[in-house]
Image: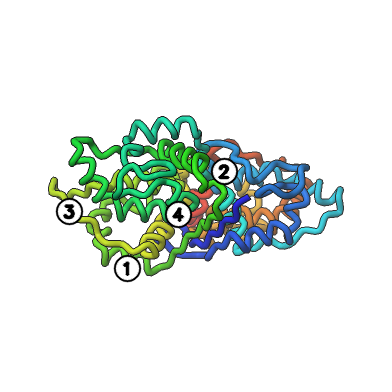
Amino acid sequence: MRQFSILLLAVTAPGFAATLPMDSERGDKLFQSQGCVQCHKLKGSGGIVANDLGRVLDRAYTPADLASTMWNHAPQMWKAIRDRSLKVGDLDPQNAADLFASFYSARYFDVPGDAARGKYQFSDKTCESCHGLTSPVNEKAKPVAKWTTLGDPVSVVSAMWVHSPEMRNELQRRNKQFPTMTAQELTDILVYLRNATPARNAPASFRITASAGAEQLASQKGCVSCHKDPKVSLSKSQTPLTLTAVAAAMWNHASMKVSGKEIAHPKLEPEEMRVLVGYYWAAQFFQGTGVAARGKKVFTAKRCATCHAGGGAGPVLSSKAGTWNGITMVSGLWRHGPTMLSRMEKDHIPWPVFKAGEMDDLIAFMNSAPGK
């Protein structure tokens, strides 16, 4: 199993505020030290009592979906921990963030790819006309076997950005159109290339860096001059984008036009691209796309107000508005869930079970400062 390392920044939706640095290597160690490995498998090792956290459950699986799955499973999980007398550690927000990074490095949130489809797309998109798998086809283009980017989506983004003007010019010389890519098509191509070349056995480094300086960098490079319109915002998306989806969007961005006139690419060094992609990807990926109005109904239906409306035993939710996402929900569940369950059983309140999308809506409602 290849070892991937991620260092990224989780952000909350309101104000684009940074919260926690995340590190997948710390998350890998926590998976062991927190006792998760006693029941769950991740990256090829661990128990078989519970589901494999390295196996993708569904397409477009989000942090909120993981929080919902963990919430629904919590009573059984706590019972299993008690029955087996397992020792588990604390899961504060920082630890939860690191575990999310570990899950992402295991490609837990990736859309599954198909090598057969990828082989077809590699030909259909005319990629093979310049890029041979193991030997050169075009003297200006490296064969795929010599690429160093296949294991790192951010490096894929950077390489595409740097070389897309040359690729576009070469295709124009051949009277061919520059091909566009969907996230699924690029995913399939990358799966095909990783399996069809020696790159499948090469060590990979999967790393994202992000900082508040990304906003200043985006301004310096002219990104914000085009992306200030909410319709093309870099920090919002109708659905959370995986890093491969970001790479596909950057590929399709090879031709840049303002008011119908083509403009030159801003020059971006690999680390600058890493900072920009990491920051804006994390912003939209962890903010979710829930609807507060629907979340208010979920809050009522699940009887959350019994304790969390301001007058009960729980905290006033509005005092923490803007801080909720999949990470903080998992941390809160882990740290306070057993007490919540005990209180609910005493008051004969059923443990709430969340259907698809309900956790995302609930988070949106909690971030909307209810009660103010």
Mark 3 belongs to which amino acid? Ile
- Which quadrant holds residue 331? bottom right
Q: Nearest the camera: 309 or 216?
A: 216
Q: Earlier in the sequence, mark 4 or mark 3?
A: 4
Question: Which of the 4 quarters of the picture holds residue 158?
Answer: bottom left
Closer mark to the observer between disc 4 and disc 2 = 4
Q: Nearer the viewer, mark 3 or mark 1?
A: 3
Q: Residues within 10 Å of mark 1 (few under 14, many from 20)?
A: few
Q: Amino acid at mark 4?
A: Thr
In the picture of the structure, the residue carrying the numbered disc 2 is 65
Which of the two discs, 2 and 3, labels the residue nearer the N terminus?
A: 2
* Disc 3 packing (10 Å; few <14; some 14–19; many ≥20): few
Q: Residue at x 65, y 46 (%)?
A: 53
Residue 288, percent from left and from top: 47, 48
Calculate the distance from the C-alpha at mark 1 to the C-alpha at mark 2. 32 Å
Q: Which residue is mark 4?
A: 148
Marks 3 and 1 close (CB-CB < 8 Å): no
Q: Amino acid at mark 1?
A: Gln
Disc 1 target residue: 216
